[in-house]
Amino acid sequence: MGLNFVFTIDGDWDEYFYTSLKEEERRPVTARIIPFIRAEIELAAVVGGKFLHFVHTSPLVRDFFLRPELIAVWKQVEALGGEVGVHCHEEELYKAWHYADPVRMAPVIEGLARGLREAGLSPLAYRGGFMTFSPSVIPLLEANNLPLDYSCDPGRYLVKSEQLVSDWRGAPDNFYGLTTRTTAGRAAAASAKCRWESISSSSPCSISGRPAGA
């Protein structure tokens, strides 16, 4: 049976996006977050528990979702057939965006992936905040064993405060691969250009052209 869809949920919460609130008011509250995640688990039961929850990290709450009470919920997700992934909102919301800065992104991606794995979880997927992506991220995903990217949103073109945030115009709406290429080879991947490879229909993306799930 072919892959028809992947049920994914971004682990963000409403108040995060309300910059009119004070910083403390924008932070998540565990007692409110956990019931939402449990509702996700119940909803995913209709697809055999197979869904992918992207765990949030950002300058506002760097390690909040690695707290023991939340790790317990992530383990329940995996035990019931689901997965957790890495979801980086690396920004000063609506002011500055750091998704294309590998120096800034490297410790963020590594920190969340490592934190989840040290807790006994098995993240394999990545999604940028606001569906952002940069070729400079590809080597970071490879280095952290995150072979699947779910950032692509075909046709999306997002500009905030006259800054380009996310541009997926011309992106394929089917299975694609991302590779890094430079004349100097992979050692110079930080300056590489992104190459799209359309592979087959209705599937997620893989890094370096390796089919998802392979």
Image (tube, rainbow, N blue to C red):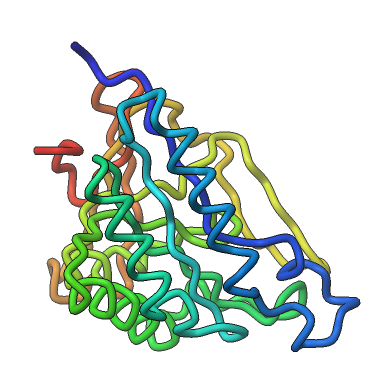
Residue 28: which quarter of the image?
bottom right
The residue closer to the viewer here, 92 or 71, is: 71
The residue sitting at 46% across, 50% down in the picture is 151
The residue closer to the viewer here, 157 or 58, is: 58
12 versus 102 height, above or below: above
Residue 173 relative to residue 82: left or right:
right
The residue closer to the viewer here, 84 or 197, is: 84
122 versus 90 height, above or below: above
The residue closer to the viewer here, 134 or 63, is: 63
The residue sitting at 59% across, 50% down in the picture is 167
Question: Can you say which quadrant of the picture contains the C terminus?
Answer: top left
Residue 25 relative to residue 190: left or right:
right
Query: Where in the figure is residue 130, as x and y percent of width and height?
Result: 60, 57
Question: Can you say which quadrant of the picture contains the N terminus?
Answer: top left
Residue 177 relative to residue 159: left or right:
left
Residue 94: which quarter of the image?
bottom right
The residue sitting at 36% across, 25% down in the picture is 47
Query: Where in the figure is residue 146, as x and y percent of width and height?
Result: 23, 60
Query: Where in the figure is residue 19, as x and y percent of width and height?
Result: 83, 76
175 versus 10 height, above or below: above
Q: Give the mark count.
A: 0
**Residue at the far right in the pictured view:** 20
The residue sitting at 82% across, 69% down in the picture is 18
Query: Where in the figure is residue 38, as x and y percent of width and height?
Result: 49, 50
**Residue at the far left in the pictured view:** 214
